Image (cartoon, grey):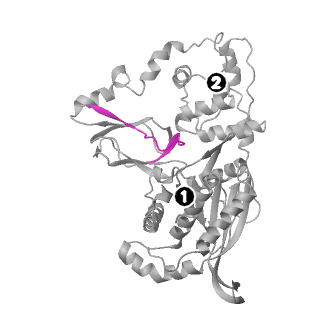
Amino acid sequence: MSVVDLVLPKLGESIMEATILKWLKKPGDKVAQDEAVLEIATDKVDSEVPSTAAGVITEVLFPENAVVPIGSVIARIQTEGGAAVAAPAAAASTAPVAAPATAPAAPVVEEVPYQPTTQPETMRPAAAVQAGSPRFYSPLVLKIAQEEGISMAELETIPGTGMEGRVSKKDMMEYLQHRGKGVAPQPVAQPTAAPSSVAMTVQPAKAPETVSQSPVTYSGNVEIVEMDRMRKVIAKHMVDSKATSAHVTSFAECDVTNLVLWRDKVKKEFEKREGTKITFTPLFIEAIVKCIKKYPWLNSSVDGDKIIVKKDINLGMATALPSGNLIVPVIKGADQLNLVGLAKQVNNLADAARNGKLKPDDTMGGTFTMTNVGSFGSIMGTPIINQPQVAIMAVGAIKKRPVVIETAQGDSIAIRHMMYISLSYDHRIIDGALGSTFLNAVARELEAFDINRNF
């Protein structure tokens, strides 16, 4: 007879919160260990959260569409027995021992009338905020506020769109955007007056809400389509990347005739023997990996004034989803796989992405990205760097063209399979010489493909 807390698990080192999309189980439903309880969404991928124990769901602590910090208790599961365990859950409001979710607030109840004489307007722990204010602030929101110099009094004036008016990361980002333009109320130095009067004068100052939410009119015959969650995330990542990295794009042309002829020759036998299709993507990845080993700075990231060169080559491949959105699953340890292993990883990850089966870890840890703009007919592209990486390569459509062939007997014109490739790189650390050298190394690797090789 025990109750197990279901905690929102860690979903990656850079993910601090997740949105609950749908509860698959409700209070009173039985659940098996490792059975999916709810669907969540992060800024990387949608996923399911499995149960950590077998039993009955007794309590769901967050509604759908709530933004929940990583590590929060989201539900409770009664593992054995019946009424004996349900009683403490029902009595959580009167029995402190059986209410772990509210226990942190108990020790600080006496601190409601906080003392400002020794505590300036700086950030306080989340527990203290709960005790002195009806609003709950997640650790992520408090961290953002502390980094941006937002006082507690100012934080309490920010309108929240989360559950019960809670302030989310999105609210903070929108507030900071308006704050930087002088639209939102600015944090002011607090005088030595009583703190209660300061709080009372700051809270009503919510006039900027009407300014930021002024209606926008559209002329002509238009259709207004609301962005879905993933499109909003993609939009933010693209803008953030352009604001972070100094983008430069270089182009190269390569003759991939041998590669095309080899694939045409072996694709049926390859699928029959290996149980998976051989596409161009693993062939491109194989060439990129070989060149990254020669030029390791392309497999790095920037941390302030430091260049972090990654020893593991985890290659991301941009994948289009049926919805039209884009996601980048990552082939971990791509340099440790042969062509067959790369082909299986490419196909497995692409299928999982299109069917919504990717796990959070499948999109984490990428060190370099490739995008195939040619799969939709584009002959070249200028891709945006996938942060915190420093480079991304685009491969264009393969087209037959007449080209000049140089031989010992003289020049001639022949029909060849030609392709443009492009490399967008972070000019903060990758200069034009290195970027172009790497790009042309990949082109030469593809052109030198052995038409007689085995797989």
| Residue drawn at point x = 50 percent, y = 73 percent | 279
| Residue drawn at point x = 59 percent, y = 74 percent | 448
| Residue drawn at point x = 69 percent, y = 86 percent | 408
Q: Amino acid at mark 2?
A: Met
The residue labelled by disc 2 is: 152
| Residue drawn at point x = 54 percent, y = 58 percent | 316
Q: Amino acid at mark 1?
A: Gly
Quarter holding the N terminus? top left
Is 433 placed left or right of 452 in the picture?
right
Determine whether label 2 and label 1 are within 8 Å by CB: no
Query: Measured from the top left, where is residue 358 in percent x and y?
Result: 45, 56
Query: Measured from the top left, where is residue 258 in percent x and y?
Result: 56, 80
Q: Read off the magenta span.
A: 2-22
The residue labelled by disc 1 is: 316
Q: Nearer the viewer, residue 414 or 47?
A: 414
Q: Is residue 134 visible?
A: yes
